Image (cartoon, grey):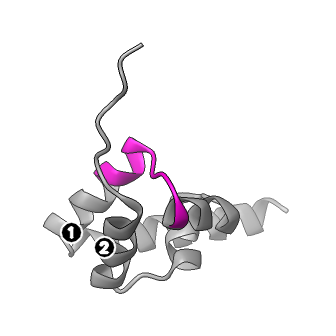
Amino acid sequence: MQEREVMMTAAEFRQSLADLGLGQVEFGKLTGTSPRTVRFWVASKIPNVAAVLVRLLLARPELVAVVKEMSERKESRERKDC
């Protein structure tokens, strides 16, 4: 089996979150990912889909606000459903 190219190293991921002004917990909330998983990414291997999202946000930082708004709406709907 051929090994897939790593799109982003753990160090690049950490720096990218800092550049975006996002902490690990906040990034987890935005993506619906557990803090434990994000900690794993920061220390080890980032899935390509997360790397693509981070690279997109770096290229278009204004999308961070859009993603935050979407996440907040989802949380609000979930609270209403409870």
Question: Type of residue at label 2?
Answer: Ser
Q: Which residue is drawn at 85% across and 62% down?
A: 82
Q: Is residue 78 above or below residue 18?
A: above
Q: Residue at x 27, y 82 (%)?
A: 19
Which mark's residue is nearer the viewer, 2 or 1? 2
Magenta span contains residue 46: yes
- Please indicate whether residue 70 sits to the left or right of residue 34 in the image: left
Q: In this view, does 6 lie above or below 55?
A: above
Magenta span contains residue 49: yes
* Main secondary structure found in the magenta portion: helix
Instruction: Please tell me whether mark 2 sits on a helix, a strand or a loop.
Output: helix
Q: Position of residue 52 (x, y in %)?
A: 29, 49
Q: Nearer the viewer, residue 10 or 59?
A: 10
Q: Position of residue 27 (x, y in %)?
A: 49, 71
Q: Residue 40 lies in what quarter of the image? A: bottom right
Q: How far apart are marks 2 and 1 (CA)?
A: 7 Å
Q: Is residue 65 visible?
A: no
Q: Nearer the viewer, residue 2 or 76?
A: 2
Residue at mark 1: 58
Q: Can residue 9 be seen in this view?
A: yes
Q: Residue at x 49, y 82 (%)?
A: 23
Chain part drawn in magenta = 43-52
Q: Look at the image and tell me in which quarter the N terminus lies.
A: top left
